[in-house]
Image (spheres, grey):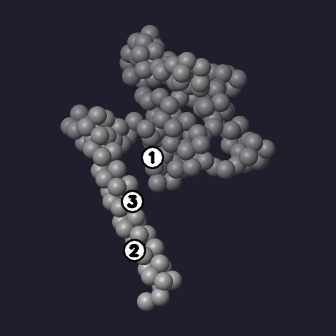
């Protein structure tokens, strides 16, 4: 074997060993370590932040919004309504509509949503907040603004047969402030 061939085969053997080592360390050991730490320290988050019903059956995730509409697509009065979803609240169809701010289809859908929400909530169209008529980037955001929650309180209270004050207290108890005290709009 000449020197060039020996050098090439030695380099190849070093590369194969390095690939094997890095695959085992970074591809297997690191993954197993992080999965174990996640399961140990943050089991709910590591398993998708699942929401369970009274019998323990998983019915959704706290990270994914869901539609509260009847079979015909009409909003169910007993529930707070979410932001619209470009993907139909399907985790496999996550994504926005990709329509630009001057797209006539988007403008018309926002106008229609604003009118429908104002009628359903019994408020002026000017009181309908932006998050009520526009989808989030993922189309799956489960959060709504405090403004959108506020215009829904009376309807939800009436539909559930409880006081509006009690519903307001529940909204307040479940409202998160701005991230780092200044990012976002509190939800």
Q: Quadrant of residue 53?
A: top left
| Residue at (71% x, 37% y) in the render | 111
Whether tag 3 and tag 1 are in contact, CB under 8 A, the answer is: no
In the image, 15: left or right of 123?
left
x%, y% of residue 110? 68, 38
Can you say whether 160 is above or below 17 in the image? Answer: above
Which residue position is annotated with label 2? Answer: 13
x%, y% of residue 179? 53, 24
Q: Which residue is the extreme one toward the bottom? A: 1
Which residue position is annotated with label 1? Answer: 71
In the image, 113: left or right of 165?
right
> Which of label 1 and label 2 is nearer to you?
2
| Residue at (44% x, 10% y) in the render | 165
Task: Specify few, some or many for label 3: CA neighbours under 10 Å numbering under 14, 14-19, or 20 or more.
Answer: few
Q: Which residue is the extreme one toward the left? A: 55
Task: Specify few, some or many for label 2: CA neighbours under 10 Å numbering under 14, 14-19, or 20 or more.
Answer: few
Q: Quadrant of the N terminus?
A: bottom left
> Which of label 3 and label 2 is nearer to you?
2
Residue 22's disc is 3
Q: Which mark sits nearer the N-terminus, 3 or 2? A: 2
Q: Closer to the camera, 48 or 43? A: 43
- Residue 59 appears in view: no
> Which of label 3 and label 1 is nearer to you?
3
| Residue at (33% x, 45% y) in the render | 34
x%, y% of residue 95? 57, 49
Q: Which mark sits nearer the N-terminus, 3 or 1? A: 3
x%, y% of residue 83? 55, 36
Can you say whether 26 is above or below 41 in the image? Answer: below
| Residue at (29% x, 50% y) in the render | 32
């Amino acid at each position: 074997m000449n020197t060039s061939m020996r050098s090439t085969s030695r380099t190849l053997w070093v590369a194969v060993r390095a690939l094997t080592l890095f695959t085992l360390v970074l591809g297997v050991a690191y993954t197993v370590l992080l999965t174990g730490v996640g399961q140990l320290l943050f089991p709910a988050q590591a398993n998708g932040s699942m929401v369970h019903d009274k019998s323990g059956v998983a019915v959704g995730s706290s990270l994914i919004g869901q539609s509260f509409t009847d079979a015909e697509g009409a909003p169910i009065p007993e529930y707070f309504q979410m932001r619209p979803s470009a993907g139909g609240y399907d985790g496999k169809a996550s994504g926005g509509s990709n329509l630009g701010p001057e797209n006539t289809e988007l403008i018309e859908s926002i106008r229609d949503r604003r009118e429908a929400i104002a009628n359903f909530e019994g408020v002026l169209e000017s009181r309908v907040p932006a998050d009520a008529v526009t989808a989030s980037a993922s189309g799956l955001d489960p959060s709504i603004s405090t403004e959108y929650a506020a215009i829904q309180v009376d309807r939800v209270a009436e539909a559930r047969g409880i006081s509006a004050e009690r519903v307001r207290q529940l909204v307040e108890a479940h409202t998160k402030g701005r991230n780092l005290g200044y990012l976002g709009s509190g939800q």
